[in-house]
Amino acid sequence: MSKAARISTPVPASSSSRTSDGVQFVSTALFAGIGLLISLVAILCGVQGAWY
């Protein structure tokens, strides 16, 4: 049987990773919010056929 070597590098826990996580969350939430707003406007305007 062959043996595999595990090579791991430590990841420093810094504030920059928290900042990038926050930016990623905000951009995802903004994208989802815009999509929901467009969907709501389309439903209220009575757009037919776009949902099938």
Image (cartoon, rainbow, N blue to C red):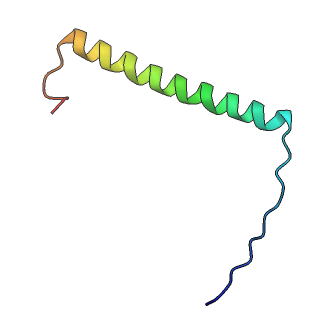
Q: In the rendered view, does 43 fall on the left or right side of 20?
A: left
User: Which of the 4 image quadrants contains residue 20?
Assistant: top right
Tally of marks: 0
Q: In the rendered view, does 4 fall on the left or right side of 9?
A: left
Q: Residue at x 53, y 24 (%)?
A: 29
Q: Quadrant of the C terminus?
A: top left
> Front-most of 47 and 16?
16
Name the outermost residue toward the front: 1
Q: In the rendered view, does 44 fall on the left or right side of 14?
A: left
User: Which of the 4 image quadrants contains residue 46?
Assistant: top left
Q: In the rendered view, does 34 fall on the left or right side of 42?
A: right
> Front-most of 44 and 7?
7
Name the outermost residue toward the top: 44
In the rendered image, residue 2, in percent from the top left (x then y), is placed at 64, 88
> Front-most of 45 and 13?
13
Q: Residue at x 31, y 14 (%)?
A: 40
- State whether residue 9 is above or below residue 48: below
Q: Quadrant of the N terminus?
A: bottom right
In the rendered image, residue 9, in percent from the top left (x then y), is placed at 82, 61
In the rendered image, residue 13, in percent from the top left (x then y), is placed at 84, 41
User: Which of the 4 image quadrants contains residue 24?
Assistant: top right
Q: Residue at x 30, y 13 (%)?
A: 41
